[in-house]
Image: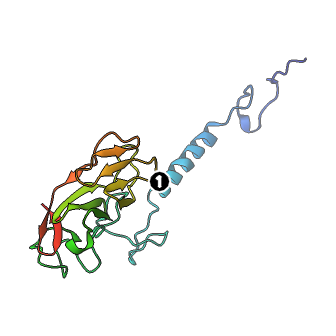
Amino acid sequence: MTDVQARTDIAHPQGEPTRQGAVAPRRAVLAGAGALGATCLLAACGTSGGSSGTNPNGSDFQNNPAPAGSKGADAGFPSGGDSNGGDSGNSGGATVLAAVADVPKGGGIIQGDLVITQPSEGTFKAFSKACTHAGCDVNKVNDGVISCPCHGSTFSIEDGSPKGGPANKALAETKVKVDGDNIVKA
């Protein structure tokens, strides 16, 4: 095998000193760094709300967006209702979660981020729909239990306690009460 050595006896154009190996001139390095900085600046400033209120990807722009992962400000409310009761009854300004008539005795419904149950006539409970095992959303209320499809955990409709599967903690409870024809946060 032969050694390859850079020749130092070759004169470079424009009077530059001779260099061994392939070393980039200082001007080229500085120009590249400047171009990279300008590109980063343009990319960071490149979002355009525009006067039409639409982002480049076509979604609507909002000055006060909902947190990431949420379903928006009106998630979980029955159609036609709003957070102040709206036309859904006489809730007196409390947050309406569901209509009493929508929650079956001995069962429940999944509404927004909650599971709302009626374990016995006129008694209503609400629990987080996030399974305490791996955070999956529960998807069914049947035969007195709340079921999670991911790993088979089941929870009681009475207190949210685990009844089966890998979950070993109860679903987080939200206190609720009946206000007229509605179930509202207590």
Residue positioned 19% across, 79% down in the render = 88
Indicate whether 159 appears above or below 79.
above
Query: Colour scheme used in the picture?
Result: rainbow
Q: Nearer the viewer, residue 68 or 51?
A: 68
Indicate whether 162 appears above or below 4.
below
- 57 with respect to 80 (left or right): right
Q: Which residue is mark 1?
A: 41
Residue 30 sits in which quadrant?
A: top right
Residue positioned 33% across, 45% down in the render = 163
Residue positioned 29% across, 59% down in the render = 115
Residue 139 sits in which quadrant?
A: bottom left
Mark 1, other Cα within 10 Å: few <14 / some 14–19 / many ≥20: few
Q: Residue 54's spot in the image, x, y percent?
A: 42, 74
Indicate whether 44 appears above or below 22.
below
Q: Nearer the viewer, residue 137 or 161?
A: 161
Q: Residue 140's spot in the image, x, y percent?
A: 38, 60
> Please, what is the three-letter code of the amino acid marked with disc 1?
Leu
Image quadrant where one finds the N terminus: top right
Q: Residue 11's spot in the image, x, y percent?
A: 79, 30
Total numbered labels placed on residues in the image: 1
Image quadrant where one finds the C terminus: bottom left
SS of the residue under disc 1: helix
Residue 166 sits in which quadrant?
A: top left
The residue lying furthest to the left in this view is 92
Q: Nearer the viewer, residue 115 or 51?
A: 115
- 97 with respect to 142 (left or right): left
The residue lying furthest to the right in this view is 1
Q: Residue 4's spot in the image, x, y percent?
A: 85, 22
